[in-house]
Amino acid sequence: MRVIGAADDELTIFERSSPGRRAFVAPALDVPERPLDALLPETLRRNQPPRLPEVSEPEIVRHFNRLSKRNFDLDTGFYPLGSCTMKHNPKVHERIAALPGHSKLHPLQDPRYAQGALELMWRLQEALSEIAGLPHVSLQPSAGSHGELAGVLLTRAFHEDRGERRTKVLTPDTAHGTNPATVTMAGYELVKVGTDARGNIDLDDLRDKASDDVACLMLTNPSTLGLFEPGIEEIERIVHGTGATLYYDGANLNAIMGISRPGDMGFDIVHFNLHKTFTQPHGGGGPGAGPVAVSERIEPYLPRPQVVKRPPGAGNGASGPFYDLDYDRPKSIGRLRGFQGNYGVFVRSYAYIRSLGAAGLHEASQVAVLNANYLLARLRREGVAEYLPAAYDRLCMHEFVLSGAPMKSELQIRTLDLAKRLLDHGVHPPTVYFPLIVEEALLVEPTETETKETLDHFADIVAGVLREAREDPEIARHAPYTTPVRRLDEAAAARHPVVRQPL
Ligand SMILES: *Cc1c(COP(=O)(O)O)cnc(C)c1O
């Protein structure tokens, strides 16, 4: 017999299986038994029982608990992943989202019996509209990238309605990978705009490329370099001058809430990542939401149906206002997904916005920017800049990019080695090798929810890893040492994922 002990941590749940072992035994049948043939045609039935592990309940609990501890998450440690806004997700949101009125609501419920949920969605639309500075919102898109697709489809509908056919979309060369992917998926030709020596959009390059076959410029401001575009008003004039739309990738909204608004900068369409800025737990492909806010001229094309508030006495028997789904949208780009979106995400983000209020959101952004600048200054004080200088030497917004180029040439360790070594210190590495235009890039976003002590500790760890590499670069080159798995072939893992045991 095989003895299963702590050392057998590597056993899969299938290897733990023992024939006949059960976690739960159903009570004896107290209704007449019916043959399966009467219930399901033969073609739909298995001819072999499913191959399931046979284990006891404690084994199941321990199996999943053990797996959960092998992952690194925000509730375990500091997670300064640039562009992803891994901020703390307040636990009260989970209590609210789990209330039966939210969690047990059927997505096809008649609006008459889902007034609370529709009101919450309508109020969330209003709040997002205020934050973006644009009058209309659709909650339908389910991720930032889905919001981008909505935005490009809205742009096409807008131009086609005016009898225009445009073929190109501009994105800066610092853009997040989803921007070019969206452009290609929507059937437009991608044209990249360069970045100047200060880290801003190269305005001359933009002027050259802004022709009347351009449909849209997709931009995030602050950019993925963590820098605010000082030329945004000139960019707006150039883009709108050609008749193109201006699309705002809202992934970096955490830097500017209540301070500046994309609508005021002249953007026509904005997406939000509720799972980044507005505290929905994310990562691992879990549910997200990428609502879009749009200007008056884009509104007719918004997805169908729209959540609307009808005045009292709108023919529905209600005495107060009535929250409804409006399907009567003849110019709409149509439905983007089943039902109305990931409702649990809406509940958490609405709880976040209401519990912080306007002043609280404003302060959250101020502290996010303060924390990033503090951490950058603190890293400099530790002498880190000699090997890991800021890619652009200016005040940053909520995140900043370091370049590991000197570290690579002088210490013979790469950004990837540093990132892996951080894992041994209980810190999730920042984003690496993005934006693509910075050599050996390290994109750091501390967020507003971390303490000064955590930021100081991070700066000390980075300085320590560089000191260690000066003595012996081999140590970082073979890191990590303390994680459940060591260095992986990430490209092979992504291309040939092995997610189940061969049968
Ligand atoms: C995360 C991100 C996106 C894509 O958002 P998803 O919700 O992950 O689809 C787009 N642009 C930027 C700058 C991002 O950081």
Image (spheres, rainbow, N blue to C red):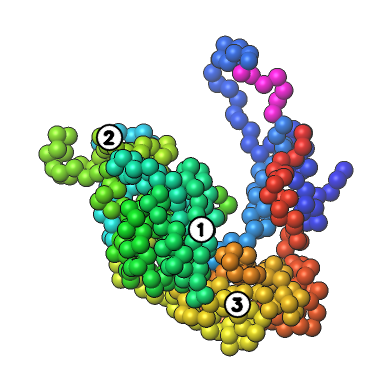
Q: From the viewer's perspective, is residue 450 above or below residue 320? A: below
Q: Amino acid at mark 2?
A: Pro
- Say which of marks 1 and 2 sits in front: 1
Q: Which mark is residue 377?
A: none
Circle 3 SS class: helix
Specify the quadrant of the image occupied by residue 42: top right
37 or 73: nearer the viewer = 73
Callout 2: CB less than 8 Å from ligand 1:
no
Circle 1 SS class: strand
Circle 2 SS class: loop
Q: Amino acid at mark 3?
A: Phe
Which quadrant is home to the N terminus?
A: top right
Q: Amino acid at mark 1?
A: Lys
Q: Position of residue 110 (x, y in %)?
A: 30, 33
Sequence-first disc among 3 and 2: 2
Sort mark 3 into few (<14), some (14-19) or many (20+) by Cα contacts within 10 Å. many
Q: CA distance from mark 1 to mark 2?
A: 34 Å
Residue in view at x 65 percent, y 70 percent: 440
Q: Position of residue 362 (x, y in %)?
A: 34, 71
Residue in view at x 59 percent, y 13 percent: 41
**What is the magenta range?**
44-50
Residue under label 3, please give it.
Answer: 458
Residue 344 seen from this side: no
Q: Is residue 236 magenta?
A: no
Sequence-first disc among 1 and 3: 1
Residue under label 1, please give it.
Answer: 192
Residue under label 2, please give it.
Answer: 330
